Amino acid sequence: MNQEHLHSQYKAIVIGGSAGSFQVISAILQALPEKFPIPIIMCLHRLKHVRTGFVEALNIKSAKVIEEPEDKESIRRGGIYLAPANYHLAVELGNTFTMSTEEMVNNSRPAIDITFQTAAYVFRNKLIGVLLSGANKDGAIGMKYIHERGGITLIQDPAECLIDTMPKAALDITSVDYTYKTNQIINFLLTLHKQYVA
Amino acid sequence: MQEIEIADLRKITEIIQSSHDYDFTNYAMSSFKRRIQRVIELYKLSSVDALVKRLEADQNFFKEFLSEITVNVTEMFRDPTFWRELRDDIIPNILLNNDTFSIWHAGCSSGEEVFSIAILLKEMGILDRVKIVATDIDHVILYRARQGMYSMKNMELNGKNYIQFQGKSSLTDYYREEGGKAIMNKDLVENVEFREHNLVIGDPFSKFDLVLCRNVMIYFNQTLQNQVLKLFHASMHKYAYLAIGAKESLIWCEIANKFIVVNNEEKIYKKIKD
């Protein structure tokens, strides 16, 4: 891991995933210490018309409480957020969330590109973008934008992905700082955590 | 395409205000910026300045701009459990004390939810006893709402929602198909008043027993949400209901204490103080 990336100034981690990412997300959430301070904002493709069940499933194994934010809710230190069904989830200036019911992007609502781009706009180089397994190209443009704004980009190793289209799409159009397997992603987060404890 | 900066957005809202008397200054930045980006791409404009020039000079372009900038993605019976709650709990409560009542549908867009409420009331046998006023900022979309013509492609989802709503018949009973379009039965909305109204600068124009404004205020910042909630408050009878979208909230608004939460899952509130 690049030493320059090891600091305690991060404002948020955004995670995008689709087909094949649920196990990875579960493993990450399970491994996170309860006091992990950096807000995590997850945009995972999900059934558009099933409002309940997903966040509950993620909560089962995690020591942290995962929630679907409401419009204009403040992003809290240590908060873990999941984009709700059938809404785009955007980060707004002033450190709040904004919901949107706009047209689907990449055939998705929530769309990872929207969450990533708005987060990168607000958090600039104090953002980490993580893109996991998935079967379409959503998130690639978002990763490119995170990189352009000086943030860190991390993809799940395509070799480990159940479906590698999504991380590969990011690799095609932007520079990626880290290509990691699930356990390496977890180590990365735990290493970062130490920066905040120290 | 260059990044749109905050200063660009300010330029745009200023020109809209001075040339057209619409106020977008307190729209939520992230979505407003995306809508602007969309218009620039749609009309193949070279820059923000090109957009500003066009907005300044071209009255007809502004009308189109207004239609593109507002989000008109909607469904019939979106969140079926909300509509069930309305039918099984909220409306029966209103009927306890009123033989007739009134509904304001604020930000009705292309009218899918207007037809939803009309179908719901018809199935309750009270459609002729309810006065519905449906408003939107954009008169082009209001015209479409009044027409009640929807792409058949969308009717599949609408029909699914209707089944989950557990309606009395089939959604197909309320429209006929013609040239790939679903044409809604006109009698459903014959008593609906469609009118242009801008939540940002509009005044209260009547008092209502139920206000529906789902997924509209998400496009506003907190300042404007506060202001619009005051407008709703002034437009509601005491003990009237207000419904907002599933992921919206009033709890951080200045006058939240004048409302109580009736149903937090479906985001239904009741006005308890004048």
Image (cartoon, rainbow, N blue to C red):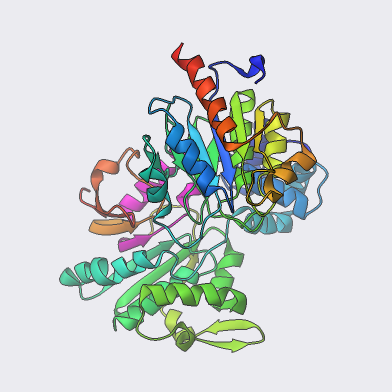
- Name the residue located 41 percent from the left edge and 27 percent from the top edge: A33
Specify the quadrant of the image occupied by residue B101: bottom left
In this rendering, is residue B148 above or below A143?
Answer: below
Residue A116 percent coordinates (x, y)? 61, 39
Q: Is residue A67 above or below residue B184?
A: above
In front: B44, or A185?
Answer: A185
Residue plotted at (66% across, 15% down) = A4
Q: Which residues are magenta?
A: B207-235
Nearest the viewer among B172 and A112 is A112
State whether residue B119 is above or below residue A121: below
Image coordinates of residue B92 in percent, x first then y, are: 22, 71
Spot occupied by residue A74 in the image (x, y as percentages of width and height): 43, 33
Q: Quadrant of residue A117?
A: top right
The quadrant where residue B205 appears:
bottom left
Residue at figure coordinates x 44%, y 86% from the top left: B187
**Residue B220 inside the magenta-drawn segment:** yes
Please state which of residues A17 and B184 is positioned toward the viewer in this rendering. Answer: A17
Q: Is residue A192 left or right of residue B248?
A: right
Q: Quadrant of the N terminus of chain A?
A: top right
**Along the line of sight, which residue is nearer the eye, B58 or A123?**
A123
Identity of the residue furthest to the left in this view: B97
Q: Is residue A186 visible?
A: yes
Q: Is residue A191 magenta?
A: no
Percent x, y of residue A29: 45, 37
Count of numbered marks = 0
Residue B192 is at least partly visible in this image: no
